Amino acid sequence: MDRLILIPGLAGNAAMWREQLAGLADLQPTVTDVNMRHRSIVDMAAALLHEHEGRLVLCGASMGGMVAMEAARLAPQRIAGLALLGTNASPETDDMRRLREDAIVLFAQGKVREVIEPNVAFAFHPANADALAQPYLDFVLEAGAEQLIAQNRAVIARPDARLHLASLRCPVLVMCGEDDRLTPPEHSREIAQLVPDARLVMVPRCGHMLTMEQPEVVNAVLWDWLTAL
């Protein structure tokens, strides 16, 4: 099978893919860290394509989905499949830009925990928040202020992926938590409507962090989709 690359979300690393690395081990997935080394969605996508040869299956969560969609725009002939988890193809809204810019000011003052900790619960379904808040907080704090500033700026300046989604010819899987409050389900529905023959899966009792909240469901859907490619 073509090489499977897992792309983390904002401030994410391999920790958010722990259950997929185990559950999909037979498919030999690789977690990229382009989000930590580049300053725009376009540059992240270009680096990913440069660092991994041949045809790729890209599985991106949240910001990672934005990177995956941009890689498909840059090199459609190299993308064998896209799995887009809890992501958004639209440009940043004015309201979200203001929220991110306000957070960036606080990150620059070193107030990372003060910004992130009160908002951790928004990333999860209420039933999952208590168990998963600390692991999530751990990897966000590990990323640190500089990365949070750079990656939020990258998301603010992201391209409008809607402009090229209709031209995709590779298989596309779109997944979203039914209770995602950070990237609500209408964004996933929009992507699925724009992509020819996309498969849309809504995951119950799940918020934004699908890979951590409902790993058995996510792994089962990904396994069936990936092995059918």
Image (cartoon, rainbow, N blue to C red):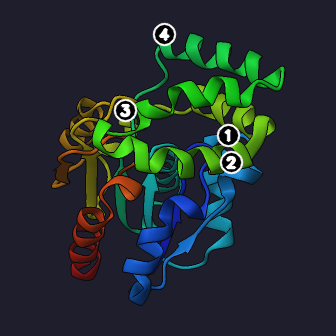
Q: Earlier in the sequence, mark 1 or mark 3?
A: 1
Q: Percent x, y for residue 148? A: 70, 35
Q: Residues within 10 Å of mark 1 (few under 14, many from 20)?
A: many
Residue on which disc 4 sits: 95
Q: Is residue 15 above or below residue 25?
A: above
Q: Percent x, y for residue 122? A: 42, 30
Q: Residue at x 29, y 33 (%)?
A: 187
Residue on which disc 3 sits: 183
Disc 2 residue type?
Answer: Asp
Q: Nearer the viewer, mark 2 or mark 4?
A: 4
Q: Measure how far apart labels 4 and 1 are at the Cα level.
A: 20 Å
Q: Percent x, y for residue 110? A: 82, 26
Q: Are marks 1 and 2 in contact (CB under 8 Å)?
A: yes
Q: Earlier in the sequence, mark 4 or mark 1?
A: 1
Q: Measure how far apart labels 2 and 3 are at the Cα level.
A: 23 Å
Judged left or right of residue 189, residue 207 is: right
Q: Which mark is residue 40?
A: 1
Q: Residues within 10 Å of mark 4 (few under 14, many from 20)?
A: few
Q: Residue at x 35, y 59 (%)?
A: 83
Q: Which mark is residue 102?
A: none
Residue on which disc 2 sits: 43
Q: Measure how far apart labels 2 and 4 are at the Cα level.
A: 25 Å
Q: Is residue 69 visible?
A: no
